[in-house]
Image: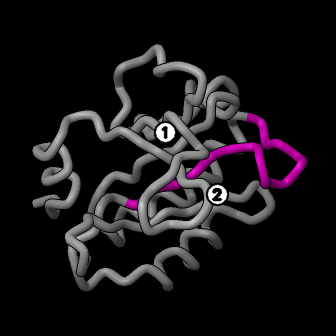
Amino acid sequence: RAAGLAVGAYHFFTFCRPGADQARNFISVVPRDQPLLPPVVDIEFGGNCPQRPSPEQLNAELQAFLGPVEAAFGKPAIVYLTDEAEAAYAGQISARPLWLRSLLMEPDRRDWVYWQYHNRGRVDGIEGDVDLNVLQGGPQKLAALLAPIP
């Protein structure tokens, strides 16, 4: 915020814990006293539990996470999906804004809010690899994401 950046909170959704437990933790640690971008929930296989839930199981646990989180923050969450997770689950996830990770080419769908196009970018002032992303919609979209929902 001090540097003029819009900020928000991100959650890596684990397949190892119930969605309701993850929601309680997220709500307890993310401050809500200043404007935030919508909460983001990351669904991916890398770094997750080896046992993948069925699409129906994931949707049930994800809903147990999203319901309380969206109620607490007053905004629909954005769902981050890797190519693999999108192929496995996108048709089962209740309609949410999307953050798509596609490193080889632009996503073949246009309904994304963010697109992660690189995972080894460089940014002045940061040592090491940085994810690079595009926001579709420019400054107006950013302002809308930060605005409270009436």
In the drawing, does residue 112 fall left or right of residue 118?
A: left
Marks 2/1: CA distance?
18 Å
Start and end of the magenta stretch?
A: 39-54
* 138 vs 16, nearest the viewer: 138
Who's the residue at 33% across and 58% down the image?
A: 38
Q: Main secondary structure of the magenta part?
A: loop
The residue type indicated by label 1 comes to Gln
Q: Residue furthest right?
A: 50
Q: Which mark is residue 116?
A: 1
Q: Where is residue 34 shown, x and y percent of the image?
A: 22, 80
Who's the residue at 56% across and 29% down the image?
A: 102
Do the CB atoms of the residues marked 2 and 1 lie less than 8 Å apart?
A: no
Residue 134, by quadrant, is top left
Q: Could you tell me which quadrant the N terminus lies in?
A: bottom left
Residue 8, by quadrant, is bottom left
Secondary structure category for the residue under label 2: loop
* 54 vs 42, nearest the viewer: 42
Could you tell me how many numbered marks the image carries?
A: 2
In the drawing, does residue 46 fall left or right of residue 132?
A: right
| Residue 139 magenta-highlighted | no
Q: Residue furthest front?
A: 124
Q: Where is residue 11 shown, x and y percent of the image?
A: 55, 63
Q: Where is residue 63 shown, x and y percent of the image?
A: 54, 51
Residue designated by label 2: 13
Quick check: 28 above or below 70? below
The residue type indicated by label 2 comes to Phe
Who's the residue at 54% across and 54% down the image?
A: 130
The crowding category of the residue bearing disc 2, from other C-alpha atoms within 10 Å (few below 14, some 14 to 19, many at least 20), is: many
Q: Could you tell me which quadrant the C terminus lies in?
A: bottom left
